Amino acid sequence: MSGNFSKNDREVITLAEANKGRKMTRKVDTYEYESLAECIRSDQVPASEIAEIFTDKAYYKWYKKKYLDK
């Protein structure tokens, strides 16, 4: 990943990296991907919940590809 990231993006990347080895504790349904991403990107989701959400590796992979791989 390279480029200029927003403060929110940097926080998301940090949370995801810090929790990437954790066992999945929360599965995100595919129909929720877009709406949940919008909530994350608009600071409506607390950091502790983002960390838990990103234990779903399929969701984080989707989120990263859509929003962080620039």
Image: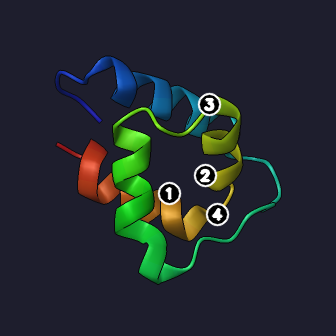
Would you say 62 lies left or right of 17 here?
left
Residue 36's place in the image compared with 48, above or below, is below
Label 1 neighbour load within 10 Å: few <14, some 14-19, many 20+: many
Q: Which residue is mark 4?
A: 56
Circles 1 and 4, Cβ within 8 Å, touching? The answer is yes
Q: Give the quadrant of the C terminus.
A: top left
Q: Amino acid at mark 1?
A: Tyr
The first of marks 3 and 1 along the sequence is 3
Q: Which residue is mark 2?
A: 54
Which type of secondary structure does the marked residue at label 2 adopt?
A: loop
The first of marks 4 and 3 along the sequence is 3
Residue depicted at 41% across the width and 48% down the height: 39
Circles 3 and 1, Cβ within 8 Å, touching? The answer is no
- x, y (%) of residue 10? 40, 23
Residue 7's place in the image compared with 27, above or below, is above
- x, y (%) of residue 60? 50, 57
- x, y (%) of residue 24? 77, 62
Circles 4 and 2, Cβ within 8 Å, touching? The answer is yes
Q: Which mark is residue 60?
A: 1
Which type of secondary structure does the marked residue at label 4 adopt?
A: loop
- Which-is-in-front pick, marks 4 and 3? 3
The span from disc 1 to disc 4 (Cα, nearest Å) is 6 Å
Taking depth in this image into account, of 46 and 1 the one nearest to the observer is 46
The span from disc 1 to disc 2 (Cα, nearest Å) is 5 Å
Q: Which residue is mark 3?
A: 47
Q: Quadrant of residue 55?
A: bottom right
Q: Amino acid at mark 4?
A: Asp
Residue extending furthest front?
A: 44
Label 2 neighbour load within 10 Å: few <14, some 14-19, many 20+: many
Circles 1 and 2, Cβ within 8 Å, touching? The answer is yes
The span from disc 3 to disc 1 (Cα, nearest Å) is 14 Å
